[in-house]
Amino acid sequence: MASSSVNLEDMYAKLSLTPEEEDGILVREEDVGQIQQKFVLVGLFLTDRNVNFQAIQNVLADLWRPKEGVEIHDLGGQRYSFVFYHVLDMERVIDGSPWTFEQGMLVYHKLEAHEDPNTIQLKTMDVWVQVYDLPMGMISEKIIQSIGNFVGEFVKADPANMNGLWKPFVRVRVRMNIEIPLKRRMKLKRAGRDFNWVNFKYERLSMFCFVCGCLGHSDRECSVVYANPGKTIERAYGVWLRAPGKNSRTQNTRSK
């Protein structure tokens, strides 16, 4: 029996369309993107494990408790949509992030008009960073913003940073690229003086690699470890990058 395999492109090239098929339809702008009129986040969880969709629905609905409700849809490929019915419900979820399910942190994107939820890139996450060892005379809005842009992309600062009371750290909201290792510290130098080390801790930080410093996997699954079997691998990151809650002012900082 002869092979029945046919190149689809060749087959389609041979098709001849009727006038009716060539006409198509004209779509008006007011008929497009009804889902965008609601308030939609698209996200995935940073984990290699299979995620139980029913469990996600139950857990997040219980955590978020949106007043006007939320619909969670499985888009396939471990990607989900979160459809809210009031902007305040969505904003509370955004402001409360990062969210974690079974050690996997939720990476999300606020869907804009005409964006495709299946192809939009999910590479950033907003987190609160605690900045330690910042010299008293160098606590200013401009310096805090610059530090935020060093860690990632500055989003906002905690208004309590500037309330005039001494505190062991200040807080800055940062949009981080999840494909880049966590920043542990930075040099801060004042003109004519020696530099200071400024150290970072991340609030609500879940799974990350102690070897490469990237989110979403542990050191046991790190490609660096697999590329160097039998060798001693330095773990330059650790649990000390996890911050206490914003109301805790007692944890000591540790730098490498």
Image (cartoon, rainbow, N blue to C red):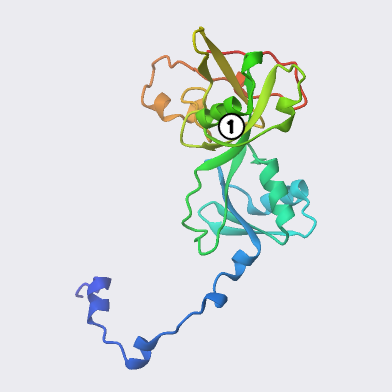
Number of numbered callouts drawn: 1
For residue 35, above or below residue 133 = below
Question: From the image, which quarter does the N terminus lie in?
Answer: bottom left
75 or 174: nearer the viewer:
174
Q: Residue furthest left?
A: 2
Neighbourhood count class around disc 1 (C-alpha, 10 Å): few under 14, some 14–19, many 20 upward:
many
For residue 175, above or below residue 60 = above
Residue 120 at what x, y percent from top left? 48, 54
Residue 197 at what x, y percent from top left? 54, 13
189 or 130: nearer the viewer:
189
176 or 167: nearer the viewer:
167
Question: Image check: 4 left or right of 156?
Answer: left
Residue 85 appears in the rendering:
yes
Residue 97 at what x, y percent from top left? 66, 41
**Which quarter of the figure has residue 246?**
top right
Query: Type of residue at label 1?
Result: Met
For residue 137, above or below residue 122 = above
> Residue visible at 38% across and 21% down?
229
Residue 75 at what x, y percent from top left? 55, 59
Q: Which residue is mark 1?
A: 207
